[in-house]
Image (tube, rainbow, N blue to C red):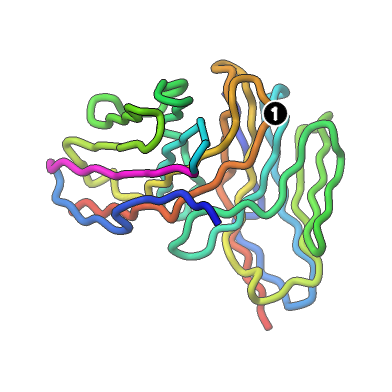
C-alpha cells in the first residue's frame, strides 16, 4: 500500500522567514496531494492541495510543488507569521485497491514561528 | 459553514470497558472515514465507508473495534473491550468523493480524545 514520509519532524523559523516541508510517496497511482494544518486540540484543516496533472499551485503565502517522477511534493510558506505555528501533515490519495479515494498521511511537521 | 460533528469531545474510560464515538458528516457527503491519531503521529485510517458500505477496514482491529453507518449518514465507532494502547484522538472525516471520481477535499471533525486508564 501507499507509504508517505515527511521531513522534518520539527521546524523552527523566525517570523518573516520561509519554511519548507517535504514529503515522498511510494504509490505511483496516487494522484491527489492535500496538505493539512492541525492546531492543538483540533482536527486537521485543509490549507492547499494539488492534483497530479499540475506541477505547482500557489495561494497567497502558501505554495505546493509536485514532482511525479521523483514521487515527492513540498509545502512552501513564505513570510511566516506566529499564527502559522501548528503541526502540518501531507497526504497522498489513491483509488488503487478499493476504487475509492483513500488518504494516507505523513507523520507531521511541527512548525514553530518565533516573533 | 457545514461541519463534521463528533461527540463526545473527551472520553475517559477504564480498560476492559466499552466505549463508543459518534460522527455526523457534512450533509451529502457519501464518503466517511474514521482515523486514529496517536499523540505526535499522523492520522491512520481505521475504516472507510461509501454510503452505508464498508470499502476499507483493513487496518481496523476487528477483534475489538466495530463501525457502522446504517443509513449512510451518521456513523458510530465502538471499542470493546478498551485497552490502554487505545488512548488516542479518534477523528472522523467526510468527503464528496465517489468511486473513481476526481479526488475531493476531506473535511475533519474536532475529534474525540480517548484516555484509557
- Dot 1: chain letter: B
Residue stretch rendered in magenta on the structure: B16-26
- Residue B112, given in percent of the width and then of the height, sits at 34, 52
Q: Secondary structure at mark 1?
A: loop
Q: Is residue B11 above or below residue B80?
A: below
- Residue B87, given in percent of the width and then of the height, sits at 29, 49
**Magenta residue check for A15:** no
Q: Is residue B94 above or below residue A64?
A: above
Front residue (pair B3, A49): B3
Looking at this view, name the residue that lies furthest to the bottom: A115
- Residue B80, given in percent of the width and then of the height, sits at 18, 35
Residue at the image point whose x is 69% and y is 43% from the top:
A23
Front residue (pair B99, A61): B99
Q: Which residue is mark 1?
A: B102
In the figure, is residue A68 to the left or right of B72?
right
Q: How many marks?
A: 1
In the figure, is residue A43 to the left or right of B22?
right
In the figure, is residue A75 to the left or right of B106?
right
Amino acid at each position: 500500500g501507499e507509504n508517505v514520509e515527511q521531513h522534518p519532524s520539527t521546524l523552527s523559523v523566525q517570523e518573516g522567514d520561509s519554511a519548507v516541508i517535504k514529503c515522498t510517496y511510494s504509490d505511483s497511482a496516487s494522484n491527489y496531494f492535500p496538505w493539512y494544518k492541525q492546531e492543538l486540540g483540533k482536527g486537521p484543516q485543509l490549507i492547499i492541495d494539488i492534483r497530479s496533472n499540475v506541477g505547482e499551485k500557489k495561494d497567497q503565502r502558501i505554495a505546493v510543488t509536485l514532482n511525479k517522477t521523483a514521487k515527492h511534493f513540498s509545502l512552501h510558506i513564505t513570510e511566516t507569521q506566529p499564527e502559522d505555528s501548528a503541526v502540518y501533515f501531507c497526504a497522498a490519495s489513491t483509488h488503487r485497491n478499493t476504487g475509492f479515494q483513500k488518504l494516507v498521511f505523513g507523520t507531521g511537521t511541527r512548525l514553530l514561528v518565533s516573533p | 459553514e457545514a461541519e463534521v460533528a463528533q461527540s463526545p469531545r473527551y472520553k475517559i474510560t477504564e480498560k476492559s470497558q466499552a466505549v463508543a464515538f459518534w460522527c455526523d458528516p457534512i450533509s451529502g457527503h457519501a464518503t466517511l472515514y474514521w482515523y486514529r491519531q496517536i499523540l505526535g503521529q499522523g492520522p491512520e485510517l481505521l475504516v472507510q465507508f461509501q454510503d452505508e458500505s464498508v470499502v476499507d477496514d483493513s487496518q481496523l482491529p476487528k477483534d475489538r473495534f466495530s463501525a457502522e453507518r446504517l443509513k449512510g449518514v451518521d456513523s458510530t465507532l465502538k471499542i470493546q473491550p478498551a485497552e490502554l494502547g487505545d488512548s488516542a484522538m479518534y477523528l472522523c472525516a467526510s468527503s464528496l468523493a465517489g468511486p473513481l471520481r476526481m479526488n475531493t477535499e476531506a473535511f475533519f471533525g474536532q475529534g474525540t480524545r480517548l484516555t484509557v486508564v
